[in-house]
Image: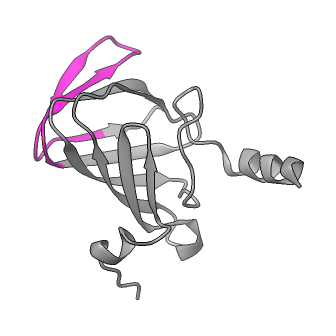
Amino acid sequence: MIVRKLQDIRKSDRNVKSNGWESARLLLKDDAMGFSFHVTTMFAGEELHMHYQNHLEAVLVLKGTGTIEDLGTGLTHQLAPGVMYALNANDKHIVRPETDILTACVFNPPVTGREVHDENGAYPAEADMVRTAELAN
């Protein structure tokens, strides 16, 4: 059994901050659950361009408001507490938080923990991360 406190994760290296968001990663690949679980805040006034080419993601909005635009269809959806969106087709999208948006997110395959969005708005595939680390050595 794994038991963790959000307040402890927020003080650890499992709390990742990047441009426009902060993510407390409660479950990661090394936890061997088959998915990762994050509590993420997207900050008001940002425009977050994302395209998870290597991961599927489901997001539940807990607090805050904004919109998500599906760049494949051109449709824009309102985000508010209780709204869930699933990027089941590696959907290219833009999130525009009107207020800070607090979410609970699940990624498949699980992330390793230190990922941040690349120039395409994606997290790299794990194999890409290994190659990058090997090239750095």
Is 103 positioned to the left or the right of 38 in the image?
A: left
For the residue pair 66 and 35, the one nearer the viewer reads as 66
Pinpoint residue 124: horizontal percent, then vertical percent: 64, 42
Within the image, what quadrant is residue 91 found in?
A: top left
Residue 81 shown in magenta: yes
Vertical placement of 65 versus 13: above or below? above
Residue 35 shown in magenta: no
Within the image, what quadrant is residue 2 found in?
A: bottom left
Pinpoint residue 97: horizontal percent, then vertical percent: 22, 32
Look at the image and give the residue range highlighted in magenta.
Answer: 62-85
Vertical placement of 64 versus 37: above or below? above
- Number of numbered markers: 0
Report the coloring of the rendering: one colour
Residue pictured at 47% horizontal, 66% vertical: 14
Which residue lies most toward the top here?
A: 74
Vertical placement of 25 versus 47: above or below? below
Is 10 positioned to the left or the right of 50 in the image?
A: left
Is 38 positioned to the left or the right of 97 in the image?
A: right
If the image is split into quadrants, where does the C terminus sit? bottom right
Residue pictured at 80% horizontal, 53% vertical: 133
For the residue pair 94 and 90, the one nearer the viewer reads as 94
Residue pictured at 57% horizontal, 56% vertical: 114
Pinpoint residue 42: horizontal percent, then vertical percent: 29, 41
Residue pictured at 34% horizontal, 20% vertical: 70
If the image is split into quadrants, where does the N terminus sit? bottom left
Pinpoint residue 81: horizontal percent, then vertical percent: 10, 45
Is 7 positioned to the left or the right of 19 in the image?
A: left
Vertical placement of 129 versus 26: above or below? above
Which residue lies most toward the bottom here?
A: 1
For the residue pair 82 and 14, the one nearer the viewer reads as 14
